[in-house]
Image (cartoon, rainbow, N blue to C red):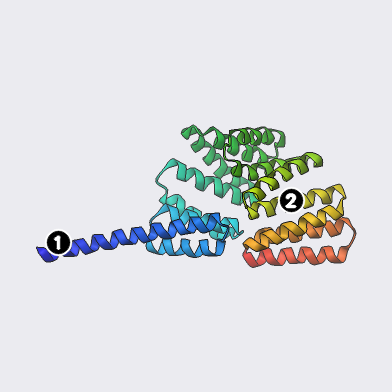
């Protein structure tokens, strides 16, 4: 009887230690993710999953990290596994929101809409008005109803108390103004996003906004400023290891040189973008 009790004790101890180790590794994953050290975040996430294969948190952290560096196929696989392991409506909301964002990047509007609509339903169930506004904005943006999208992005912005969280929404508002040809408004919103990102040391989102600002100046015909902002944005996305945004930067350089009728350089940069996208499987 004593031997059986000891065996049970050691089994329970092993489980508890395994869970503790997994929790530690998951915390490391998020810590590295927030520090934008994505390589270490991936390593910690993978280790946490090995230790605790049926936990939502490490799968979601790893999926988020893959999304941030543009490894969208791996991100989708990990997020769909997270969906199976989700225990709460909030966790499901996060998964559906991220899947919607990824499929929008992959220019798969039907699938993006499917996930954003599921996220919207959960946001309404939870009474989360900020997330509801954000999902409505994403849905209208995908559908091309840009004026309605702006209304809901602005509403989401008003309901966001954490200033750091405003950076992405400000950039999305700026992008819509750019698409509408309202370049001065786009520049104002991108600069607001850049200022906040810089203040909080968010080099990744700063880099994305700098790249997008560069393309606005390209459209305005101010090629000197366009080159400056593209150069600055490229440095930052390379520093954090975001291959997808690096490829986007090369495409924007291609557009810049095409506008200046430098067809040889434009072709070279478009080719660099194409090769890098193929390398990361986009």
At a point 79% along the width and 48% down the height, the residue shown is 216
Q: Position of residue 203 (x, y in %)?
A: 65, 55
Query: Of the residues under marks 2 and 1, which one precedes in the sequence?
Result: 1
What is the crowding at mark 2: few (fewer than 14 residues within 10 Å), some, or many (at least 20)? many
Disc count in the image? 2
Q: Which quarter of the image is occupied by the N terminus?
A: bottom left
Image quadrant of residue 153?
A: top right
Decide: is 163 above or below 204.
above
* Contact check, label 2 and label 1, Cβ < 8 Å: no
Q: Position of residue 53 (x, y in %)?
A: 39, 60
Image quadrant of residue 151?
A: top right
The residue under label 2 is 212
Task: In the rendered structure, find residue 156 and report the number of the disc placed on it.
Answer: none
Pick whichever, 125 or 164, lies toward us: 164
| Left or right of residue 269, residue 41 in this image | left
Query: What element does badge 1 sit on?
Result: helix
Question: Is residue 148 in view?
Answer: yes
Q: Position of residue 198 (x, y in %)?
A: 67, 50
The residue under label 1 is 5
Q: Residue furthest left?
A: 1
């Amino acid at each position: 009887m004593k031997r059986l009790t000891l065996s049970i004790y050691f089994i329970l101890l092993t489980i508890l230690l395994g869970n503790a180790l997994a929790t530690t590794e998951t915390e490391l994953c998020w810590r590295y993710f927030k520090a934008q050290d994505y390589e270490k975040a991936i390593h910690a996430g993978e280790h946490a999953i090995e230790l605790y294969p049926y936990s939502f948190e490490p799968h979601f952290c790893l999926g988020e990290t893959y999304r941030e560096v543009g490894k969208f196929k791996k991100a989708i696989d990990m997020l769909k596994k997270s969906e199976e392991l989700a225990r709460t409506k909030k966790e499901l909301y996060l998964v559906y929101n991220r899947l919607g964002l990824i499929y929008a990047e992959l220019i798969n509007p039907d699938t993006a809409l499917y996930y954003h609509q599921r996220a919207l339903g959960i946001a309404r169930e939870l009474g989360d008005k900020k997330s509801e506004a954000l999902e409505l904005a994403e849905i209208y943006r995908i559908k091309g109803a840009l004026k309605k999208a702006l209304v809901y992005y602005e509403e989401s912005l008003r309901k966001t108390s954490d200033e750091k969280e405003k950076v992405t929404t400000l950039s999305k508002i700026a992008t819509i103004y750019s698409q509408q040809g309202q370049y001065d408004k786009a520049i104002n919103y991108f600069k607001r996003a850049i200022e906040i990102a810089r203040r909080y040391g968010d080099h990744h989102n700063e880099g994305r906004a700098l790249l997008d600002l560069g393309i606005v100046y390209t459209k305005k015909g101010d090629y000197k400023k366009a080159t400056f902002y593209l150069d600055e944005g490229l440095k930052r996305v390379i520093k954090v290891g975001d291959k997808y945004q690096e490829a986007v930067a090369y495409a924007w350089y291609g557009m810049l040189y095409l506008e200046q009728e430098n067809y040889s350089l434009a072709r070279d940069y478009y080719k660099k973008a194409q090769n890098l996208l193929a390398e990361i499987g986009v």
